[in-house]
Amino acid sequence: MHELAICQALISQVESIAKDNAACSVASITLGLGPLSGVEEHLLRHAYPVASAGTIAEGAELNIQSAPIRVRCSECGKESDARPNRLLCGFCESWRTRLISGDELMLVQLELDKPETPASEKLTQFN
Amino acid sequence: MCDTCGCNITKGNEHLISAGGKLEKTQSGREAVTVLHSLLHENDHTAQHNREHFNAHGVIAINLMSSPGAGKTALLEATIKALGDEYGIAVIEGDLETENDAERIRQHGVTAIQITTGSACHLDAHMVHDALHQLDLADLDIVFIENVGNLVCPASFDLGQHRNVVLLSVPEGDDKPAKYPVMFRTAGIVLLSKSDLLPVLDDFSPERAEGYIRKLANPAQLIQTSAKTGAGMPGWLNWLRESIEENRVALQDAPGLPGHHHHHHHDESMVVAAQEPVARGPGQTRV
């Protein structure tokens, strides 16, 4: 399974962000994971302790937010919910749809513990 | 999706980061860092690097995926026989163990680089990058990347390819696209391989297979092929020639690449579209 490889990629990103922000530990990691990402939540949860052992991310709480599968129809223009193997428009049944949510595989947010950080400081980085 | 312009904020995740969303507030004394990076950021970055390397030499890279034993190597052998005089071809072979497939390809006079992944169930962009160091792209037109036989993991990793080809062999059954939607969503073309077995395995319905592909909102063409009898090969070779031509035209229109001779505004949209990771949608129009 490739969840361990994905977990290792996650840890390497977390380590680099923690270092850039001079954090001493990572309190929590929030991921966005869509059903069409190809990654299974429970396998990722199993892989996480192995991948994070001995890193700054060891012991961090892993929050996984699942995004709904949504499609936009190219024929009738409407948006509807869909299933992984049935991405048809919920209104007109057309297969000419575009996925607008549900394939996310994303590191959304980190909560970092920092030595002598002023409380409630919020740092946002989009890079 | 890219990580710079905010286009990775989707309907599915925007509630997480908008004001008052679950993640906006943080416990006191802690610092919340909003990241919004793909978990495969590093892989995607290397994949893009690979793609630029292919583009700089005007080479099309084609990622072949299927379950083990669906006939990827046999398809390549038949393809090399048919197109070897017309195009410069090389193959990157991914397997857990052995050089067997690479040796089969080399017997046709074509360069083959074997990547043995050990226990890894998929190729990633870094492995392909390493293989590219052993490959001289100067005289090539097509690089086939034969992925590890697996209908699950390879779908998640962009390698830097321009097209995805997925083989579904007749003995596997026609409902594989319904069972492995992540893989079959990415297919730019689906080859129903070992079609010479259709008369024997008559519970396989090509129409049903097509129905399952359409249910994944994938417009990909399906072709019944048999590397053994040669059936369906003309359709597949046509698709290859068309893809090579489309890729050349796209490269000519893209700025900063060889063959580019004019600047115009829709160049930009093409370059942005080219950055969309292949595993996140049908990989038809990548440069």
Image (cartoon, rainbow, N blue to C red):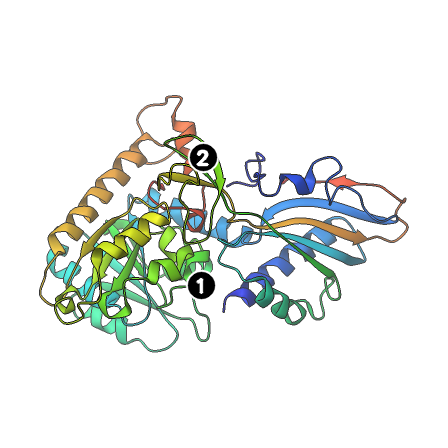
For residue B57, which quarter of the picture? top left
Q: Are marks 2 and 1 in contact (CB under 8 Å)?
A: no
Give the camera-side residue of A111 and B100.
Answer: A111
Identity of the residue furthest to the top in this view: B264
Q: Amino acid at mark 1?
A: Cys
Tell me the amino acid under the disc marked 2: Val
Please tell me whether mark 2 sits on a helix, a strand or a loop.
helix
- Counting from the top left corner in percent of width and height, residue A2 is at 50, 66
Q: Residue B239 placed where, x, y %?
A: 20, 47
Q: Is residue B37 shown above or below A61?
A: above
Q: Chain of mark 1?
A: B
- The answer to which of B103 and B38 lies nearer the viewer is B38
Calculate the distance from the C-alpha at mark 2 to the C-alpha at mark 1.
26 Å
Q: In this rendering, which labeled residue sits more in front, label 2 or label 1?
A: 1
Residue behind mark 2: B272
Q: Where residue B153 is drawn, which disc sits there?
A: 1
Count neighbours of disc 1 (C-alpha within 10 A) and say few if under 14, some if 14 to 19, many if 20 or more.
many
The answer to which image quadrant residue A11 occupies is: bottom right
Going from the N terminus, do you reach mark 2 or mark 1 first? 1
Looking at the image, residue A65 sits to the left or right of residue B209; the answer is right
Taking the image as shown, residue A18 lies to the left or right of residue B57, namely: right
